[in-house]
Image (spheres, rainbow, N blue to C red):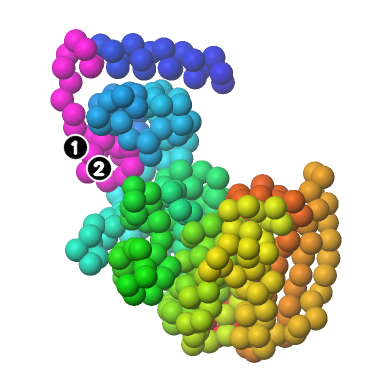
């Protein structure tokens, strides 16, 4: 396998040099039917690589260099990045405008005068004949959906469980992508209408695919988790259950939170998270205990948790389950001892982070347990 990749790389680089420096190749349109398919032939191959480097540059010194395409963060967009690009987006794809097509597509939605972007994955089993759940997964501050997809990859799970998966892209704030989880006010540094965008996005996807609108779930990492909590507080008519990884609630969200229905919540957090401290030491942020207390109280769940403990490759994970809430909702917390600010690479009772979230939220619809 390594020899094949090396050979491919040599051929690719040689062809790239010939095309770029001898033939003066014209850049094709990037408005293809699927990511990476620059020439629109439903395949991602060497021709697309040549276009790839022309559009996105080959080094950070070039004006057209795009950090989103520098998958290995070495300051160059090269064959290694293209191979990573293919690994994420595949080598063949259908037309993202065809609601019968399965696979991974980058789509746009015009909202509030801004063209917004999202990545959608339609599992192979989807045929449109029966309603399926929708899972939204939000990246963290400074993140890009296409890179976040690589380490918070729920596609294998979507194929097994037959749900449609969406990774929305945040807009820029001071040069970094973000999610605006605050209400409109003079104190809010962001004017992005992310709540409106997500509502429009859910409506758009529900109009194109056979979605069970009572089973729309939201999860996120870091700033994406902040936003997920805010969605559950301010737009719970759209969201059945939520999951948070390395995130918490802002005091503003807590003070204004008013869900319209009992909402099941799963929280996964490390005790050594120095970006979003477990104890809530940062100004304006709730501790994880305060977040749990809010949702336990709102759902009228038991204050006495069922507690279990496991060790995964030297990492201790404590599981707290608060059950018997209204509409049979519950609150669950996985406390990763000495865990940092990451989308956790853990296994609890054979389930990784994505599986833990899905197994929990999928038990519920907007009315409670389904």
* Nearest the eye: 358 or 326: 326
x, y (%) of residue 120? 40, 55
Observer able to see residue 296: yes
Q: Residue at the location (33% across, 60% down)?
A: 99
* Nearest the eye: 37 or 94: 37
**Where's the C terminus, which quadrant?**
bottom right
Q: Residue at the location (84% across, 61% down)?
A: 309
Pointer 2: what residue?
Answer: 32
Pointer 1: what residue?
Answer: 29
Give the magenta range: 19-42
Is 256 situated above or below 130?
A: below
Observer able to see residue 129: no
Q: Indicate the secondary structure of the residue bearing disc 1.
A: loop
**Where's the N terminus, which quadrant?**
top right
The dominant secondary structure in magenta is loop
Marks 2 & 1, CB-CB < 8 Å contact: yes
Q: Is residue 75 left or right of residue 61?
A: right
Q: Check disc 2: other Cα within 10 Å, few if <14, some if 14-19, many if 20+.
A: some
Is 145 situated above or below 285?
A: above
Is 315 situated above or below 69?
A: below
Q: Residue at the location (66% across, 85% down)?
A: 297
Q: Check disc 1: other Cα within 10 Å, few if <14, some if 14-19, many if 20+.
A: few
Q: Indicate the secondary structure of the residue bearing disc 2.
A: loop
x, y (%) of residue 311? 83, 52
- Residue 37 within the magenta-colored segment of the rendering: yes
**Residue 170 lies in what quarter of the image?**
bottom left
Is 203 situated above or below 96?
A: below
**Residue 209 lies in what quarter of the image?**
bottom left
Q: Is residue 102 left or right of residue 257?
A: left
Q: Residue at the location (65% across, 53% down)?
A: 273
């Amino acid at each position: 396998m390594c020899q094949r990749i090396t050979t491919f790389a040599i051929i690719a680089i040689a062809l790239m040099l010939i095309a770029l420096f001898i033939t003066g190749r014209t850049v094709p349109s990037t408005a293809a039917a699927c990511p990476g398919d620059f020439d629109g032939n439903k395949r991602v191959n060497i021709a697309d690589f040549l276009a790839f480097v022309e559009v996105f540059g080959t080094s950070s010194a070039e004006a057209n260099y795009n950090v989103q395409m520098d998958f290995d963060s070495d300051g160059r967009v090269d064959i290694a990045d293209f191979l990573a690009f293919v690994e994420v987006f595949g080598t063949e794809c259908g037309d993202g405008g065809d609601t019968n097509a399965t696979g991974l597509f980058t789509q746009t939605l015009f909202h509030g005068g801004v063209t917004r972007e999202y990545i959608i994955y339609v599992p192979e089993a989807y045929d449109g004949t029966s309603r399926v759940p929708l899972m939204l997964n939000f990246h963290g501050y400074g993140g890009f959906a296409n890179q976040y997809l690589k380490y918070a990859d729920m596609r294998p799970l979507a194929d097994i469980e037959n749900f449609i998966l969406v990774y929305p892209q945040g807009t820029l704030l001071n040069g970094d992508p973000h999610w605006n989880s605050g209400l409109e006010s003079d104190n809010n540094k962001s004017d992005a209408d992310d709540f409106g965008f997500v509502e429009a996005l859910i409506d758009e996807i529900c109009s194109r695919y056979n979605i069970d609108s009572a089973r729309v779930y939201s999860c996120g990492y870091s700033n994406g988790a902040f936003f997920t909590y805010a969605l559950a507080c301010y737009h719970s008519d759209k969201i059945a259950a939520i999951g948070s990884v390395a995130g918490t609630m802002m005091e503003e969200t807590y003070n204004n939170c008013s869900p319209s229905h009992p909402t099941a919540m799963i929280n996964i957090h490390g005790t050594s998270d120095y970006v979003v401290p477990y104890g809530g030491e940062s100004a304006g942020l709730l501790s994880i205990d305060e977040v749990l207390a809010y949702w336990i109280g709102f759902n009228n769940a038991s204050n006495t948790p069922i507690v279990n403990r496991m060790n995964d490759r030297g990492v201790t994970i404590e599981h707290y389950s608060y059950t018997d809430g209204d509409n049979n909702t519950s609150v669950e917390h996985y406390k990763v001892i000495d865990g940092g600010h990451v989308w956790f690479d853990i296994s609890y009772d054979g389930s990784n982070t994505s599986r833990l979230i899905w197994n929990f939220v999928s038990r519920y619809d907007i009315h409670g347990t389904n």
